[in-house]
Image (cartoon, grey):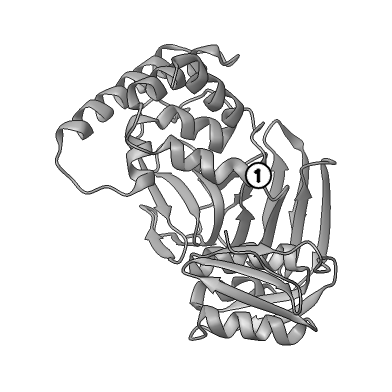
Amino acid sequence: MKKSSVYLILRRLVDGAVPAIHREKVLRWMVADQETEEKEEALRRIWLETESEADESTYRSLSATHLKIRQARKEPTHLSIFQRVLQYAAIFLVFVLTGAGGWFVAESSHEEVEMLECYVPNGEQRTILLSDGSEVCVNAGTLLVYPKKFVGKERSLYLSGEANFSVTKNTEKPFIVHAGALNIKVLGTKFNVDAYPGTGKIATVLEQGSVRVYKTEDSSRSVLMSRDEQLTYDISDDSFIKMPINASEVSAWTYGELYFKDQTLLDILPKIERRYNVRIKLSPEIESEDQFSIKFRENETIEDVMRILTLLIQDMTYRQEGDNILLYMSGKEVRKK
C-alpha cells in the first residue's frame, strides 16, 4: 500500500471519521505486522500536525517512546495484538484516548512518567492494582493506560472501554479518569465508567462516595453525582442525563454476570459480543427498538444466552458458525456466505 494511503486511513481513524462498522477492521489492519514502517511514519506525521503546542518535555517524551519502540523490537517476546501496536504506535493511542497531541508528563515537575498499558481482549477481564492501592477491574475490549507510579498533584489515567474503580482516598491528590470527552474526578470512591468508542455515549455510575464529571475542555460545566446515580453524556448533542439506578446491577459484570434493564438489542448485543468474544449480526427484519430486562449468570454459555434471547423475541432464531452468530426470523431464508 502507498504511504499516502496509509496516512489517509490513519488520519481518518484519529479524526473519528471511520464508521463504527469499519473501525474493528481498520484496527486489525493497524496492528498487523505488514507495513509497520509506513504506519509509524504516518503516525509521526499526524503527531507533528497537531495544533497542540509542544514544549521541551513533549519532545523528551516522544524520544523516550521511540527508544522504547526500538528496544522492544530487539526483545524476543510473545506479544498480543494491542501490545504490538502500543510498542510501535504510541502516538496513535494518545490521540484515541485524549483527542490531543499532549504526552504524559507530570505537571508539577515536568518529570517523565512511565506509562503502562493494559488491553483486555474480548472474552476476558482483568484486575489492575495501581501504585496508590486503588483497584481497577477492566472489562473486555478495553484499553487502560496508567502510570507505573503517580507523581504530581493528580492521579490521572486514560480509559477507552469499561472499567470499575475502587479508589483509595487521598484528599491531597484527586483521582481523575480521562474517558473520551469527559473527566471523572474523585478523591476516594467506587464507580463504573462505560466509554466504549463508537457508542456515542459515556456513562458513569456511582456506587459509593461522590464524583464530579466534567468535559475535558470545560471544567466549569461539571455535574456532581451521588450514590446509586447514573450520569450519561450524549456525544452527539453534547448533553448530560442523570437518573437513579441500582449501581450494583451495573457492576455485575465484574463478577461474571450481565444485567440489562430496559435496553434494546442494539444495546445488549455489543456487550454479549465482548463478553463471549463472538460477532453477532442482526437480520434487518428483527425489531430492534423493543426494550428488555434480562440477567445472564456467570456460568451461562453463549448457547444459553442465544436460547434465552430467542425465547424473549417471538419467532426469532439463530445460527452459529464458529464465532459468528446470525439472529433472524424463523421461516426467513438465510444464505450462507
Q: Which residue is mark 1?
A: 20
Image location of residue 54, percent across then percent down: 49, 13
Q: Vertically, is 252 above or below 162?
A: below
From the image, which quarter does the N terminus lie in? top left
**Residue 112 location, quadrant:** top left
Q: Vertically, is 70 above or below 239?
A: above
What residue lies at 54% left-to-right and 30% top-to-bottom?
95
Residue 148: in sight, yes or no? Answer: no
What residue lies at 53% left-to-right and 47% top-to-bottom?
159
Residue 154 appears left or right of 224: left
Image location of residue 118, percent across then percent down: 39, 50
- Is the residue marked by circle 1 packed among few (<14), some (14-19), or many (20+) residues within 10 Å? few
**Residue 268 location, quadrant:** bottom right
**Residue 331 location, quadrant:** bottom right
Residue 187 appears left or right of 28: right
Residue 127 appears left or right of 25: left
Image location of residue 158, percent across then percent down: 51, 43
Q: Vertically, is 139 above or below 15?
A: below
From the image, which quarter does the C terminus lie in? bottom right
Q: Count numbered badges in the picture.
A: 1
Secondary element type, mark 1: helix
Q: Which residue occupies the foreground of this view, 330 or 237?
A: 330
Residue 137: in sight, yes or no? Answer: yes
Q: Which residue occupies the foreground of this view, 312 or 87?
A: 312
Image location of residue 191, percent across then percent down: 60, 63
What residue lies at 60% left-to-right and 42% top-to-bottom?
22
